[in-house]
Image (spheres, helix red, strand yellow):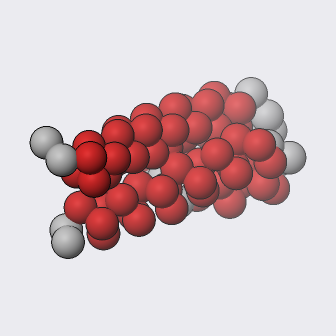
């Protein structure tokens, strides 16, 4: 495996792991705040998680979610080339 392919694979794994971890972390944080139903809904409708997270004051978790999603999209595009 050449170094460029290895870098893309590592980027894919790292960004996806960041996205999933931040998503679960956001859902738990949203469930702990009012209205509690936003947590379970955010698990089913993922784009709502950072939106509601920013609204609830969960800025770090939302930023990690957005960073993970953007990184995943970029590495998926690079993997297609």
Q: Nearer the viewer, residue 59 or 40?
A: 59
Q: Nearer the viewer, residue 22 or 72?
A: 72
Left or right relative to 75: residue 23: right
Task: Name which quarter of the figure residue 23 lies in.
Answer: top right
Residue 41 appears at what percent x and percent y?
Answer: 53, 46
**Residue 58 in picture, x, y percent from top left:** 79, 43
Q: Position of residue 13 (x, y in %)?
A: 35, 39
Compared across the picture, whether 4 is left or right of 60 comes to left
> What is the residue that sits farthest to the right in this orientation?
57
Seen in the picture, residue 29 relative to 60 is either above or below; the reply is above
Judge left or right: residue 11 versus residue 6. right
Residue 69: % across, % down = 49, 56
Q: Residue furthest left?
A: 1
**Residue 42 sits above or below residue 32 on the image:** below
The residue drawn where x is 70% and y is 51% is 63
Residue positioned 13% across, 42% down in the render: 1
Q: Quadrant of the C terminus?
A: bottom left
Tell me what residue is drawn at x 39 percent, y 46 percent. Answer: 11
């Amino acid at each position: 495996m050449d170094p460029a392919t290895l870098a893309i694979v590592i980027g894919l794994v790292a960004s996806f792991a960041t996205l999933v971890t931040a998503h679960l972390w956001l859902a738990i944080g949203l469930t702990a705040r009012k209205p509690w139903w936003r947590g379970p809904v955010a698990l089913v409708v993922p784009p709502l998680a950072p939106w509601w997270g920013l609204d609830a004051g969960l800025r770090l978790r939302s930023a990690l979610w957005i960073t993970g999603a953007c990184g995943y999209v970029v590495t998926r595009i690079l993997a297609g080339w």
